[in-house]
Amino acid sequence: MIYCVEDDDAIRNLMIYTLKASGFEAKGFESDGSFWSAIRNETPELVILDVMLPGEDGLTILNKLRSSPATADVPVIMATAKDSEYDKVVGLDSGADAYLAKPFGMMEMVSHIKAALRRTRNKPSVTLTCGIVTLDEGKHAVSVAGKPVSLTLKEYELLKLFMENPGRVFTRDHILASVWNLDYYGETRTVDVHIGTLRTKLDKGGDLIQTVRGVGYKMAESNER
């Protein structure tokens, strides 16, 4: 089930029609009130969220989704008339998985949805360990020295990328392409912000994520710890 939160009736109806024609189940909501009521009854696979809404705006809704354990991992695509780099960075830093600037094509929307769902469906049950940090893909859980750590979806995917490739240096552009599925090379600030919050949440385990000056970041190998 995909939820579309959009206050423009014509746009919302077109989105729902396109999604259903593409084989998805979808429901539309014009404001935060009806959306939150639906969330309490059914957690969607993905949310398409307009930024400018009556009542709570899209970013406020996004922050609430990310702060709740029940919806922290639900992919969210932001849809808004704003198309500046600053507005993209704010949305991505807040935990959005992708960004659609209006007017966008319906097939572009479907493509973003399929890409986001591919990254979250059918995850294999694999446990990765690096020093005191453990990531259990089957349970979608992270722990540091045996203590559970709560991460947002993007923080989790960022950590997973590093732990799958210890010692490999990733540029910010590569991280954007791998974790955010973006080929726009002007939003690297969002990588630095997420690295900072991830290190903080991992506490002593955060030291394993190393900065490679002038290049990017890497996860320390065993002989470097």
Image (cartoon, rainbow, N blue to C red):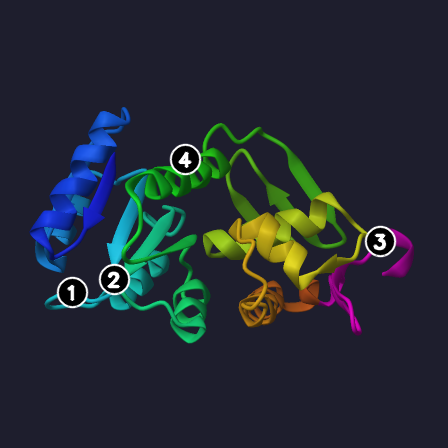
Coordinates of residue 3 in the picture (x, y in percent): 22, 43
Viewer-nearest residue: 56 or 23: 23
Q: Can you see residue 65?
A: yes
Type of residue at label 3? Glu
Between circles 3 and 4, the one closer to the viewer is 4
Type of residue at label 2? Ile
Contact check, label 1 and label 2, Cβ < 8 Å: yes
Between circles 3 and 2, the one closer to the viewer is 2
Contact check, label 3 and label 4, Cβ < 8 Å: no
* x 44%, y 63%: residue: 92
The answer to whether 80 appears left or right of 114 in the picture is left
Circle 4: element type:
helix
Coordinates of residue 32 in the picture (x, y in percent): 14, 59
Which residue is identified by label 1? 53
* x 65%, y 48%: residue: 161
Is 131 located above or below residue 112 in the figure?
below
| Residues shaded magenta | 207-225
Q: Earlier in the sequence, mark 1 or mark 3?
A: 1
Which residue is identified by label 4? 114
Circle 1: element type:
loop
Between circles 1 and 3, the one closer to the viewer is 1
Give the alpha-carbon distance from disc 1 to disc 4, as whole Å.
Answer: 25 Å
Give the alpha-carbon distance from disc 1 to disc 3, as whole Å.
Answer: 46 Å
Q: Earlier in the sequence, mark 1 or mark 2?
A: 1
Type of residue at label 4? Lys
Which residue is identified by label 2? 61
Type of residue at label 1? Leu
Is 8 located above or below residue 89 in the figure?
above
Coordinates of residue 139 in the picture (x, y in percent): 51, 37
Contact check, label 1 and label 3, Cβ < 8 Å: no
Which residue is identified by label 3? 221
